[in-house]
Amino acid sequence: MGENKQSNIIASNRINQIQEETEQPALVKKIGGTTFDIHVYFSETSKETFADKVLRLIQNDDATT
C-alpha cells in the first residue's frame, strides 16, 4: 500500500473517531488547576446495567482496601 494511501486511511479513521467522540456526552470539571474532560460511552451490547456496574465497582474497591 502506498504511503499516501495509508496516510489517507489513518486520517479518515481519526476523523471518524473525532466525530464519534463529539456525539457522546461529555462532562468538563475543573478541580484546582486540573481540568477533567470526561467522555461517556454506553455499549449497546452490554448485559450489565449502569447501576450494576457502579455497584460492582464499589464492591471491588472495598475488596482492595
Image: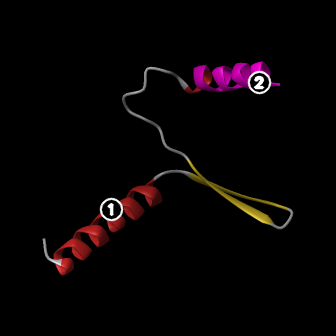
Residue at image coords 38%, 62%:
19
* Number of numbered tags placed on the structure image: 2
Residue sitting nearer the eye, 15 or 26: 15
Label 2 CA crowd tier, 10 Å (few <14, some 14–19, many 20+): few
Q: Secondary structure at mark 1?
A: helix
Residue sitting nearer the eye, 47 or 9: 9
Instruction: Tell me: residue 46, above or below residue 31.
Output: above
Q: Secondary structure at mark 2?
A: helix
Q: CA distance from mark 2 to mark 1?
A: 38 Å
Q: Which residue is mark 1?
A: 16
Quarter of the picture containing the C terminus is top right
- In the image, residue 61 lies in the stretch drawn in magenta: yes
Residue at image coords 38%, 33%:
44
Residue 64, labelled with which disc? Answer: 2
Side (left or right) of 18 relative to 3: right
Side (left or right) of 13 relative to 42: left
> Start and end of the magenta stretch?
52-65
Quarter of the picture containing the N terminus is bottom left
Dot 2 amino acid type: Thr
